Amino acid sequence: MNEVSVRAPKISRDRLKKKLYFFSLVAALLILAAFFSEYLCPYDPYAQDMSLAKAAPSAQHLLGTDRYGRDMLSRVIAGSFTSIFSTLALVGFITVLGTIIGVFCAWAGKWIDTVLMRLADMFLAFPGLVFALAVAAVLGGGVHNAIFALAAISWPKYARLARSQTLAQQELPYMQAVRMAGSSPLKIIRKHVLPNIAGPILVTAMLDIGTMMIELAGLSFLGLGAKPPIPEWGSMMSDTRNLLATQPWVTLAPGFAIFLSVMIFNLLGDTVRDWLDPKNRR
Amino acid sequence: MEKILEARHLRKVFQAGSREPLLAVDDVSFAVGAGEKVALIGESGSGKSTVAKLITRLLAVTDGQIFLDGEEITRARGMKLKQAYRKMQMVFQSPVDSFDPRCTLGDGIAESLRNHGYAKAEAGAETARLMELCGLRPELSDCYPYEVSGGQCQRAAIARALAIRPKLLILDEATSALDVTVQAEIMSLLNRLQRELSMSYLFICHDIALVQDFCDRVLVMHNGRIVEEGTADEVIRHPQKKYTQMLIDSVL
Amino acid sequence: MSEIIRYEHVDISYYEKRVVQDISFAVQPGEILGIAGESGSGKSTLLRAAMGLLGRGGVVTRGDIWYGDKDLPDLPVKELRALCGSEMAMIFQSAGNSFCAIRTVGAQLWEMMQAHGKKDKVAFAEQARDILAKFGFASPGRILDSYPFELSGGMQQRVGVAAAMLLQPKLLLADEPTSALDVTVQKQVIEEMLLARKLFGTSILLVTHNIGVIRKMADEVLIMKDGACVEYGNTHEVMERPQSAYTKKLLAAVPCLRR
């Protein structure tokens, strides 16, 4: 008789939760910092001092100054307010709008569904920048119009997602049980559909924050977003792009700020997605 | 005997895109009397689950009429359908999937009570009573469906179906996802409830042996049609049709 | 020792939680061992352990699974893969899902044969047709040319059994092979598996919750509850004179047709 072997189980600890807490904390700090950015600036971001123009980074001005002698660090910090909150507003708006339209389409069906979804296709077919240019031409530039332009071409993604998720929920057995319990459609949507489709929509929104931030910065870069002198990362890069060869810090500082924020939101989105993934639940 | 449910010449055609239309239910007529236990047996694809969905109005009929307690409900909608669901409830095949994963069992059972005018506190008390009636501890009302066993979940589903005191209970493969020992418990629960509440059952099932012990009358479905009908013992011991004979011979 | 496969004091854990404990049994050549139990009893886990299919977090923490002189849980993945298919084959609850939907049945079987070093495609086609014919398929060529979704669930399962026999394995591991099937089809699949044993002398390790299937097929039976063995012995003996209280309860709960 052979001896009975014993094998030790490999223990794999779940690090996902820690990761989630960490990135949530970092993102929360970023948003908080953006909210109080006014008070965090070491100098007035609008104060010009021509004697200090285009100064290299130093102990007084950690990121140097731009061509009007404004402190770059202060401008980057102040710029976070417009950049981050306009992005959050945009993402929040398209998420809510898209979800409402999507759920409505799935529930109504028939011609309403067809009409709204073809409309969504139409908006999807517009190239973002061209549409933004058109909006800017008609309504003028500015952050609000840039948000409007991006919202108009981004909501269909959420509408489609919400619609397909709702249709999937409608097929589930519990939906039949709920219908037989005599609940009204509005109650079913509020109590059963929305909580069950919220997960994937939230994850998409999280992952979209980064994309939308870049798109908004891009529009500002082209002069279609925030107007100077309001600090905004995209327009700051655009203003100073001819200094890239000689005083690179002026352009790189806002660029790096965009890069960092986008990365934080993307990593948070990824973590949330992993966390909600049923495969990672035990 | 008074008829609680009557289906007349039901037909259902599934039309999907450009594909050949599928005749799932073809001229099905039957009745369920008050306090009667009727079984609908057949193999997968025979149309028995479609029949259940047609009479519960979860699917629209192509042709035919459905009468519930003397009233026609073939095209009932809105309030009229809600009234119909007071008289007829259903227990589904997969207990866990028949509850919203984000609601507790208690919420699920109380939902129909709340919809039919119970106040929150009343609904809570009634839920506790129903759970006890179905052999569940009241603490389980705070559990989510995936936290309890399949048998407990199916008991909760039965409690939910009984909440508004229906006259007819439709059981669509209600025990086939459960273990045999649990199935035996659920069947004895159903028997007890039927004696106490004198409901009618429409029992949709593929297990012929189970039907023999449980039901008064058996309808055999094949390819969307009812091919044989009679008392359970008649059909099983002296099948008239070749298909029924084959079905019975295949039972191990 | 002439056994095909032997489990010795096997414990299996998922993430430190023990789901199978101290199971021992042996299967002789040409023998069918039925493992019965209710959901959560660990019967499928037991079968998966042999094929290295425990998945994430699952590990055989104690005991050995001997296939000849090879201890399967300690075998390198590569060697285990070489055994799978040629020496041991597995049949799942729905064979349809283990076929790829976009290629024909024949193409997938050929791929499987190539993975085991077969080179001659003509010989393969002949052999495949031959084996399907042996299992009573009316037109084997048509089956090989069809896509999985063109076959009914029962047909897929029957093709699955025939495909598993292509390499003439010594051991067939069947995990709930008939549970998704209608009774009339279940009967055909059972007869097909019995025929496989008759033709090739294959041993079968059969996991099912259906006592009727056990009664019909198994020579020996092992009843499991909560990861442990409650009864192990000759099928006829166990069915007629169950010893443990659980087996008695289980058998009493099975509805029996009175003809």
Image (cartoon, coloured by chain):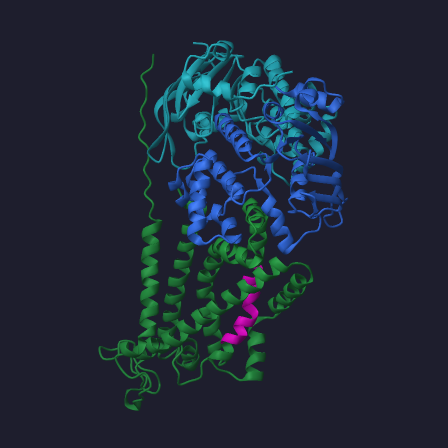
Chain colours: A green, B blue, C cyan
- The spot of residue B166 in percent (x, y) is 58, 42
What secondary structure is the magenta-colored segment mainly?
A: helix
Q: Is residue B1 above or below residue B145?
A: above
Q: Is residue C7 visible?
A: no
The residue lying toward the viewer, choosing from A250 and A182, is A182
The residue lying toward the viewer, choosing from B18 and A178, is A178
The residue lying toward the viewer, choosing from B76 and A262, is B76
Task: Determine the residue positioned at 33% across, 40% down.
Answer: A12
Q: Magenta stretch containing residue C245, yes or no?
A: no
Q: Magenta stretch containing residue A148, yes or no?
A: yes
- The spot of residue C17 in percent (x, y) is 34, 33
Judge from the rendering whether residue C144 lies leftward or rightward of residue A282; answer left or right.
Answer: right
- The spot of residue A73 in percent (x, y) is 30, 77
Q: Give the range drawn in magenta.
A: A147-160
Q: Name the outermost residue toward the front.
A: B1
Task: Determine the residue positioned at 75% across, 42% down.
Answer: B11
Examine the image and state in which quarter residue C126 appears.
top right
The residue lying toward the viewer, choosing from C11 and C98, is C11
